[in-house]
C-alpha cells in the first residue's frame, strides 16, 4: 500500500462520493428523459436501473447525446441547452430536500480537519447544485468556498470530467503538486480525469447507494482498470489510508 504523506491534498469527488446524490439526481434525469422522448423521437429507451448504471457521473448534456446517438438531428444545441437547464432546475429541487452524506463522510471530514490534512471538493456539478447538496447534507461547514471546485463554473469554459482540467485547477488553487494529491472517485469518468491530470494516488469508492451490492465487485474491477490503486466500500476506510502511522520517514 502506498503511504500517505501529510503534505498531500485530498481531492474528493462529490456526487456519489461525498454526498449520496447520484440516485436522486439520476431518477430526476430519467423522468425528464422519458418526457423528452415524447417530444423528440429517436431516443434510446433505458429502464431506470440501466439508466443509473450507464450514466452515473455523467453530465446531462452528455447523457442526451448518448441517448440520441442514432438520431442526432432530433435535438439541436438550443434544445439541448434548454433541457440541460431544466434538468439542473429539477435536480436541485430534489437534492435540496433529499441529499444526504454518504455513510461515514462527516467522520472522515472531521478527521481531516482535526489532523490539519488539506482537502477540497472537485466536481462536474455546478456551484449552485453543490451548495444545495452540501446544505441538505449538513456538510457546508466542512467545505468553505475556496475548497469547492466546479468543472461547470470554476473554469473559464466548462470542461467536465473525464477531462483533467478541474483537477489541475484545484491542485493549482490549493498550491499542491498534482503528483502529491489523492483523488477519491466513484465513477470511471472521474478516475479517467484524475489519471489524465497526473494525480499521484487515486482511490475508488463503491459505497454509494447508486451502486447495488451485486454491482460492487464489477464496479471495483472497472475502477481498477481505469487507474485506481485502491478501492474502498466504507468511507471510514479512507482514514486508515491517511493515518499518520502509514507515513514513511
Image: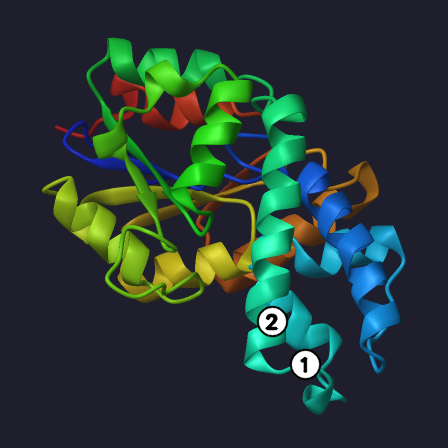
Q: How is the image coloured?
A: rainbow
- On residue 80, which mark appears? 2
Residue corresponding to mark 1: 75
The answer to whether residue 98 of the structure is visible from this angle is yes
Classify residue 105 as left or right of residue 212. left
Residue sitting at 54 percent across and 19 percent down? 137
Residue toward you, 114 or 1: 114
Quarter that holds the C terminus: top left
Specify few, some or many for label 2: CA neighbours under 10 Å numbering under 14, 14-19, or 20 or more: some
User: Counting residues from the N terminus, which is met first, the one under dot 1 or under dot 2?
Assistant: 1
Give whichever of 46, 89 is nearer the camera. Answer: 89
Residue 61 screen position, x and y as percent? 57, 67
How far separated are the C-alphas under marks 1 and 2? 6 Å
Residue closest to the eye, 4 or 8? 8
In terms of secondary structure, where does tag 1 sit?
Answer: loop
In the visual, does 111 lie left or right of 114? Answer: right
Amino acid at each position: 500500500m502506498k503511504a500517505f504523506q501529510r503534505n498531500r491534498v485530498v481531492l474528493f469527488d462529490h456526487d456519489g462520493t461525498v454526498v449520496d446524490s447520484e440516485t436522486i439526481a439520476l431518477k430526476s434525469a430519467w423522468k425528464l428523459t422519458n418526457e423528452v422522448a415524447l417530444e423528440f423521437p429517436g431516443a434510446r429507451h433505458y429502464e431506470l436501473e440501466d439508466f443509473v448504471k450507464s450514466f452515473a457521473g455523467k453530465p446531462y448534456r452528455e447523457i442526451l447525446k448518448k441517448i440520441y446517438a442514432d438520431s442526432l438531428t432530433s435535438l439541436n444545441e438550443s434544445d439541448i441547452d434548454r433541457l440541460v437547464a431544466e434538468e439542473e432546475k429539477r435536480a436541485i429541487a430534489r437534492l435540496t430536500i433529499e441529499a444526504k452524506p454518504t455513510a461515514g463522510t462527516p467522520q472522515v471530514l472531521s478527521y481531516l480537519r482535526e489532523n490539519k490534512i488539506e482537502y477540497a471538493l472537485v466536481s462536474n456539478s455546478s456551484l449552485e447544485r453543490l451548495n444545495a447538496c452540501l446544505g441538505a447534507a449538513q456538510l457546508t461547514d466542512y467545505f468553505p468556498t475556496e475548497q469547492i471546485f466546479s468543472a461547470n463554473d470554476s473554469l473559464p469554459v466548462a470542461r467536465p470530467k473525464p477531462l483533467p482540467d478541474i483537477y489541475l485547477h484545484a491542485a493549482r488553487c490549493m498550491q499542491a503538486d498534482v503528483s502529491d494529491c489523492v483523488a477519491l472517485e466513484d465513477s470511471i469518468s472521474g478516475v479517467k480525469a484524475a489519471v489524465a491530470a497526473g494525480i499521484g494516488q487515486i482511490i475508488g469508492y463503491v459505497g454509494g447507494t447508486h451502486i447495488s451490492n451485486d454491482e460492487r465487485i464489477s464496479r471495483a474491477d472497472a475502477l481498477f482498470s481505469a487507474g485506481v490503486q485502491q478501492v474502498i466500500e466504507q468511507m471510514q476506510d479512507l482514514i486508515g489510508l491517511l493515518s499518520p502511522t502509514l507515513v514513511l520517514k
